[in-house]
Structures are given as structure tokens and as C-alpha cells.
Amino acid sequence: MQKIRKGDTVVVLAGKDKGRSGEVIKMMPKEDKALVQGVNMVKRHQRQTASQEAGIIAKEAPIHLSNLAVADPKDGKATRIGFKTLEDGTKVRVAKRSGEEING
């Protein structure tokens, strides 16, 4: 079970976007990277296609998982993740900061 998943709200710990938060759009577990909405934006030249116009577009670049932390559901600050096994045998993620379960 991964600590950070698609759909989680994360806080950036290091880099040019330090302190910003956003939702994970895509996970890349083989590269240990993630795409976070509105974070680590880069400008790319786009060739014209039938569906898209040419020009310079801004899009998210992957960011390393070591520079991300899950936001605590209680106060939105960065927290570490722990795991807890419930009575019915299911394993859930828990925020170390507040002890609350992380949905997802």
C-alpha cells in the first residue's frame, strides 16, 4: 500500500513551490514521482494538431515523492503517514499528526 495516492491533497516540502499544496493528478511509482495540480508548472511549446492550437502552454511537471507530504485532514499541514489494521482486517492510512484516517 502506497503512502501517497492519486486524489490525495499534498504539501510541497522543497523546491520552488515549497509550501504550496494541490491534488495529486497522476502517480508514477516506477520513477517515484507524481503530478500535482498547479505545482511545478513549466512552459512547453505545443505543435498545432487537429484538436489543439499551436503556442506556448503551461503544464505540470512531475515532482519527486520525497518532496511531497500528505496534508493532514484536520488542519491541512504536512503529516507523515502510518497504517492501522481495523477489526475487519482492512488496512487504512492514518495521519501521524492528528491520528485521523485518510480517505482514498
Image (cartoon, helix red, strand yellow):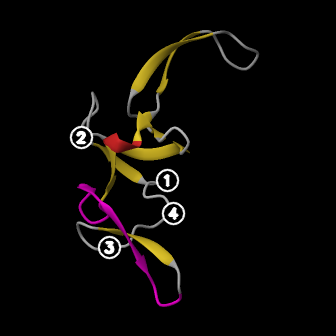
Q: Which residue is mark 4?
A: 1
Query: In the rendered structure, which disc, 4 or 1, sits on the residue that comes first in sequence?
Result: 4
Q: In the picture, residue 19 is in which quadrant?
A: top left
Q: Is residue 20 above or below residue 75?
A: above
Q: What's the distance in space between the residues labelled 4 and 1, CA to CA?
A: 15 Å
Judge from the rendering whether residue 13 lies leftward or rightward of residue 46; answer left or right.
left
Q: Residue type at mark 1: give it.
A: Gly
Mark 3 to mark 1: distance in Å?
Answer: 17 Å
Query: How many C-alpha atoms fall within 10 Å of the one at disc 4: few (<14), some, or many (≥20)?
Result: few
Three-letter code, disc 4: Met
Which residue shows up at 28% across the image and 74% down it? 99
Which residue is the site of mark 1?
7
SS under mark 1: loop
Residue receiving disc 3: 100
Query: In the rendered view, does 17 fall on the left or right side of 36?
Result: left
* Figure label count: 4
Instruction: Classify mark 4: helix, strand or loop.
Output: loop
**Which element is circle 3 on?**
loop
Whichever of callouts 4 and 2 sits on the residue coming sooner in the sequence is 4
x then y, percent, for residue 74: 27, 66
Identify the mark at residue 19; answer none if there is no mark: 2
Earlier sequence position, callout 4 versus callout 3: 4
**Residue farthest to the front?**
30
Q: Label 4 to label 3, Cα distance in Å?
A: 17 Å
Q: Which residues are magenta?
A: 72-88
Instruction: Find the distance from the CA under tag 2 to the CA under tag 1.
Output: 18 Å
Among the two numbered marks 2 and 1 on one chain, the one whose residue lies closer to the N terminus: 1
